[in-house]
Image (cartoon, rainbow, N blue to C red):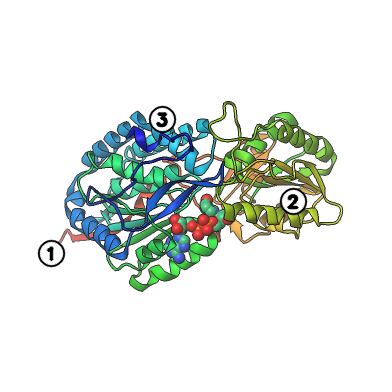
Amino acid sequence: MTTATQADAAGKVNYEFTHTINGKAETSKTSFDVINPATATAFAQCPDATKIQLNRAVASARRAFPGWAKKSFEERRAYLHKFAAAVRERSEELAALITREQGKPLSNALREMAGTANSLEQMANIELKDEVLRDDGKNRISMHFRPMGVVGAITPWNVPVGLASHKIAQALYAGNTLVLKPSPYTPLSTLLLGELSRDILPHGVFNVVGGGNAVGQWLTKHPGIDKISFTGSVATGKRVMESSSGTLKRVTLELGGNDPAIMLDDVDIAGATAKIFNGAFGNCGQICMAVKRVYVPEDLYEPVLEAFAQLARNHRVGEGFEPDVQMGPLQNKMQYDKVLDVLEDTKRQPGVRIVAGGHPLNRPGYFLEPTIVGDIGDNTRLVTEEQFGPILPVLKYTDLKDALARANDTTMGLAASVWTKDIEKGAKVAAQIQAGTVWVNHHVGSEADIPFGGFKQSGLGREHGVMGLQAYMEPQIINVPLQQ
Ligand code: TXE
């Protein structure tokens, strides 16, 4: 497996990445370039699956389903723990590949791999119990959860293996089999994960198929798929829901966020700004639940703005393999252009202050300085859209009610945070924000036993926890008369 992550002097990885279909390697006649965002050049090839190959992957998952569904939770737990151990053993290689194709610092890629192994284990440790709904001497009515069938999972490019691991863990532990399609921008680490699974999981239980958006669409329309689990943009999420409707597939959608952080007037400025900064600029701002807007009381506005600016100026940006680097490039050209466009729009706003950053780095690759923006209006692209990049608007407020109304004035509702020395007050303010997760004095995090998902157009359903697991299963009521 080592050659899959080693680059030659020109930065190219000369390794044949393959799909995993029915537990075996498959290539395709055609392939496409995978770009290293730190150099903006192609470094490897991803096989591009045909419709016939996708059909074969779905058929193999269907064949494997009855045997896998019949296994007990304990048996499936043992498989997932074994998979987690193998991932842990190879995490350095997988992390290096993530850094090369995704751009994030190697330390962050290693964290993503540790999270992947933990998530496979933690999900498989959840106990799902049958429930007795009524037992009154006349009837015994109980609820049981049954595996659904074949799950199609579609994943994005920001946290390629980490996000895939949530879907793998839930789908397989629940007793389903899986066909997973990674983003065409970052497919290789997931293909390698599939390769690693071949000696561990029964054939057909876990299939990984590389390809472009068309493969995703085939998956959502495929009559052999029972559920789609999707993480990506709101626009594509809506298309996924539409094309899944043909066979009434169950859908879980984890979409974008425009997540506010609200500082209260008793906030510890140094502590909060440092944590909010990390919550906004981690992974170059490309996290669905990242801080996307900060609301600050008027009296604290200038010191807070300056604290953010200092942090931005000291943040080390560079290629993910450079030592001590804290932020890599944006992941792809489409995203880079989109973020530059938002930046240009921001600079055109009357009275706006760019207090730190504001420029691309003078080197190849999709690098942008961490950028702090002050005195920007509410009705601007930077505030109303999900920027998904390293630009943070800092907004002033005089009245908390008004700040809450502005924070809630969005079609999204994924996550948010409240910052205060008074924890109880923080929790009361948190309850007034329309978002699936609201943290107090913290922002960004994901745990396999805690449900996660969005209000409004940030998604549909929840992943993680008992609730997440149940979303990969069908509830079944067994109604038994106790008197004839
Ligand atoms: O995502 P897409 P893109 C946001 C971010 C970004 C925007 C677009 O704001 O600028 O999304 O990014 C597959 N049927 N997020 O275009 O299109 C695709 O191949 C089925 C937020 O890369 O949503 C990939 O595997 N599948 C997000 C996956 O969908 C389709 C993380 C995601 O691609 C498809 C990433 C179709 N019709 C970007 N079209 C988050 N929630 O964290 C595409 N795909």
Asked whether residue 51 is in view, the answer is yes
Q: Quadrant of residue 278?
A: top right
Residue 247 relative to residue 428: left or right: left
- The kind of residue on which mark 3 rests is Glu
Mark 3 highlights which residue? 92
Of residue 391 and residue 125, the one placed in the foreground of this image is 391
Q: Residues within 10 Å of mark 2 (few under 14, many from 20)?
A: many
Pointers 3 and 2 in contact (C-beta within 8 Å): no
Q: Is residue 148 left or right of residue 432?
A: left
Question: Where is residue 298, by image quadrant?
Answer: top right
User: Up-down: is 337 above or below 219?
Assistant: above
Residue at which label 2 appears = 403
Mark 3–mark 2 Cα distance, whole angstroms, equals 44 Å
Front label number (3 vs 2): 3
**What amino acid type is highlighted by mark number 2?**
Ala
Residue at x-position 61% and y-position 36%: 327
The kind of secondary structure element at disc 3 is helix
